[in-house]
Image (spheres, rainbow, N blue to C red):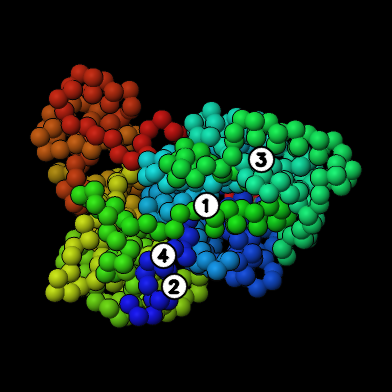
Amino acid sequence: MTDPSCDPTAEAARRRTFAIISHPDAGKTTLTEKFLLYGGALGKEAGTVKARGGRRSATSDWMDLEQQRGISITSTVLQFNYSDRVVNLLDTPGHRDFSEDTYRVLAAADAAVMVLDAAKGIEPQTLKLFEVCREREIPFLTFINKWDRPGKGPLELLDEIEETLVVEPTPVTWPVGIPGDFRGVIHRGTGAYTRFERTARGATMAPEEEVDAEQAATDEGESWTTAAEEVELLNELGRTVDTKTFLAGESTPLFFGSALTNFGVRFLLDGVIDLVPSPAPRQLADGSRRALDAPFSGLVFKVQAGMDKAHRDRIAFVRVCSGRFERGITAVADRTKRQFSTKYAQTMFGQDRDTVDDAYPGDVLGLVNANDLRVGDAVYLDGPNAPSSGFPELPAFAPEHFMRARVKDTSKFKQFRKGVAQLDEEGAIQVLRDEDLGDQAPVLAAVGPMQFEVATYRLENEFGAPIELTATPYTIARKTDDASAPALNAMQGVSVLSRHDGTRLALFESKYWMDRVLADHPDLTLSRMVAEGGLN
Ligand code: G4P
């Protein structure tokens, strides 16, 4: 390529694509907003992602339902420049509940930032998301947030991370002052002490002042002595950032701060730039890798319909994996081998959309009205010798909630069937059918119960087919196959249902029962799915 600025390998090297994972209320939204502030994407003042005074505002809320509940259900991507790098922040849903979306976003990320509330440490959803990172071998940084409020001690938090996650925390910054009396941080790499000052709700960047050790000892007294001793201890224990173990998910670079007041946010963002790996050649199903400068390819990790009520459009979010994407190129999907238009490629910034003319590995595109695309599809540049992408399948996540759906008004059955098929294609919910009831009363299977609310709402509002959900006795599922299905179906407390792609799932009433079946019938196929079990 003649223009070096169009070289996909060089452009990929400038990209940092990551997601923030946290338990609700740990501060993900606040931190996202502060990243945008430091990235210059909000002008000089924060307050776009979250309105002051409690009610959330616009940046990633589109659906009425989201607005009614004041939550963000669907995920978007936020792109900004920082330090000559292009940062792609994938926004995982921040609600109290899981959906498969959350997991799939992680399939499009090169790393994660795990946000912990200093007072709460590791909470259930953090743990669940962490397990997904581990399964997908996604390295992660850790941000201990809310240090401006009383919480657990720093060494206690380190122990908790190590014991619960079996990952070694390697602090990059260390706090001076106990939680609730945050004075500043020592940067362990440089040894410099940076003192922070409060700004009103952190609307502007935190003023920072570097203070030498002697001065710090005089000013901060015992807080300084304690922190200095702790840093000494960490040095003796060799707890310093190690790229190799970080990339292997065995250690996590750790930062302390307060997103609300901006304490420590810049260090974290610098850490993202320094440590998050740039997009790498994607591994293919056969174990080889697709070079970054191979022709354009990408992965559909999310499909969202109804983002814009006025247009009723449908957007497929594609993470670019190789090559340079140029708007207007003709691409095909691996699954269908059908071409689709890329004329309406867009980038999203919350509700705002901009046409995107080109994109590189690590970037995320929204393809409007590429209606054939489904979650998990690999897409690539079409041409006479277009190599197929060879990407491995996205994993299916283990549903944990199962409800039977019926249309309330049978005259709306056609709309119901269409809507259910659409939600299934988007991966908004898994649709399982049994032979007897078929499309009449499919079982909707979800990772988190909020998926049912979204499905119910959308079937009624988008497709004009109000539904009735009834409970089923099932609580856990395993993948099975045609050979094992009849024997399983004949058992009490077990039911085998099928997905649209022919995958068979065996549903069990309890884990206890499933374990018994497994023990009594080792010959039956019952395989685990991603993010299953033991983490609730
Ligand atoms: P989430 O997206 O992870 O769910 O968390 P979010 O950022 O919405 O933060 C949850 C609450 O925690 C918010 O308070 C937010 O202001 C507060 N918070 C976030 N980071 C910090 C921090 O570093 N220090 C302190 N003290 N609080 C923090 P809220 O009362 O729910 O909302 P609001 O009234 O403050 O807007």
> Between marks 4 and 3, how big is the CA–CA gap?
34 Å
Contact (Cβ within 8 Å) of mark 3 with mark 2: no
**Which callout, 4 or 1, points at the residue further toward the start of the chain?**
4
**Which callout, 4 or 3, points at the residue further toward the start of the chain?**
4
Callout 4: SS:
helix
Q: Identify residue for label 1.
A: 275
Give the amino acid type for the residue marked by disc 2 in the picture.
Answer: Thr
Give the amino acid type for the residue marked by disc 4 in the picture.
Answer: Ala
> Between marks 3 and 2, how big is the CA–CA gap?
34 Å
Image point (11%, 38%), residue name: 482
Q: Is residue 155 left or right of residue 24?
A: right
Q: Which mark's residue is nearer the viewer, 1 or 2? A: 1
Give the amino acid type for the residue marked by disc 1 in the picture.
Answer: Leu
Is disc 1's CB within 8 Å of ligand 1? no
Q: Residue 12: which disc? A: 4
Contact (Cβ within 8 Å) of mark 3 with mark 1: no
Residue 481 percent coordinates (x, y): 15, 38
Q: Residue 139: which disc? A: none
Q: Tell me the quarter of the picture where residue 33 sits.
A: bottom right
Q: Residue 118: which disc? A: 3
> Between marks 1 and 2, how big is the CA–CA gap?
25 Å
Q: Identify residue for label 2.
A: 347
